[in-house]
Image (spheres, grey):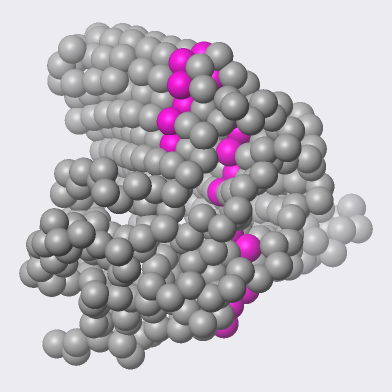
Amino acid sequence: MKQYYDFKIEKIKDLSSDEIKLRKKNLDLFYQTGFPNKKDEDWKFSDLNSILIKNFNNITNNDCLPKEKNLKLIEEFEHNFISLYNGRLMSSDFAHEEKNKILIENFNYKKEKNLDKKNSLNFLNHALASGGFFLEISENYELKKPLVIYNNFSNSQKETIVNYKNLIIVNENSKLNLINYIDNSSKENFMANTIENIKMKKNSSLKNVLINNSGCNGYFYKYLKSDLDKNSNLENYLISSGFKFNKIDIEINLNEKHSSSSVFSALNLINNEHQEIKTRINHNATHCRSYQKIKNVLHNESKGVYQGKIFVKNIAQKTDAYQLSRALILDDAAEFDAKPELEIYADDVKCSHGSTSGSIDLDSIHYLKSRGIPEKEAFQMLINGFLGEILEQLSEGKLKNFLIEKLERQINGH
């Protein structure tokens, strides 16, 4: 088999002997299997090993940090921000907030305890990660403005992989609106491998939006793990288009009663883009609620994948869980794969899942054309209505308008 990667822990600076030993152990575990392939059940629809072989000659890790380019801020709404460049924390600004209520610092790898094994990409992250951030919101504090995390990558990242970790703690009775924003138009092929942990304390609330500004030749994998305490609420919004490959692997643990989570996704894929959303929602306590609505529109030779599992523990009575995936397939060469699952060990629950796919309603197109709307615009209107539904849960405001505008630009190919 073609050997197309070469990773060296020695490139990472300022590691203790114990850290080097642990990282080498994780790198050895990665090398036992390499990048995930279709033999792994969780990767049966997204053979990453084959995808990377076709697009990379030799993937290496590079711990050098070039100078940060000028940060272009979103102008449509006021916000706080954190700036990451090649995964490194470069700057932050919380001018709208009480700064003593917010802690932001570099991720501390010296305190790092490895996560449970998920796949070989987690081992690779444990071995090579540097950069990333730690963010903590104090108890009883609601941020006045949204927080945007700017994720930028340099054009010098050709044939390299960036690995980093983030940890976010939203303490009791606190509230945060968070936007993970990738703004990168690099034509070079690179990969970003991220692990992010979110800890939601009692009565806390987080709206977590993942969106990109433009297309690029990046290959992205993000493992997003969230743990929710009593009465906490987590909403995830995934809006993505323009990546060569993108997989978001979400694990949500509803650990205490009356916690709730939701995942809303709108993907508009063109050309040969390949994107997957994989979710596992673990109902570990009574009276918890989860809701998932995943929508894909697929053009040309694109491929969309959704794997969603709802797990209900035997003590998790009064569970309310809903899951639905829908896809519009607009070209014969496009592909959508769905694998919804329920694993239930409690008897007093309300759980449902479903998946549908099909082409666009031609009668609706004909109706719009009969009203003088050009065919291309009619298609875009129907696609916008199909995908735009996932943003309805957001309250009105400049942030919602910004997200709607970004989604429409993606649909219109801008």
Q: Is residue 254 above or below residue 3?
A: above
Judging depth in this view, the residue of 47 and 324 nearest the camera is 47
Q: How many numbered circles are shown?
A: 0
Q: Residue, x 23% and y 71% (percent of image)?
A: 9
Residue 186 figure quarter: bottom right
In the image, farthest residue toward the right: 372
Position of residue 60 in the picture relative to residue 170 (left or right): left
Q: Quick check: is 172 in the magenta stretch?
A: yes
Q: Residue at x 26, y 49 (%)?
A: 110
Indicate the position of residue 106 as horizontal and vertical percent values: 44, 49
Q: Is residue 136 above or below residue 361?
A: above
Taking the spot 39% from the left edge, 68% from the top edge, the residue there is 162
Give the percent coordinates (x, y) of residue 204.
Answer: 49, 19
Residue 330 visible (yes or no): no
| Vertical comparison of 282 with 273: above or below | above
Which of these two is toward me, 107 or 37? 107
The quarter of the picture where the C terminus appears is: bottom right
396 relative to 93 in the view: left or right? right
| Relative image position of residue 330 (x, y in whole percent) | 57, 64
The quadrant where residue 336 appears: bottom left
Q: In the depicted view, which residue is nearer to us: 380 or 270?
A: 270
User: Residue 107: image x %, image y %?
Assistant: 39, 48
* The N terminus lies in quadrant: bottom left
- Magenta range is 168-187
Please say whether residue 70 is visible from this viewpoint: yes
Q: Is residue 239 magenta?
A: no
Q: Residue at x 55, y 14 (%)?
A: 140
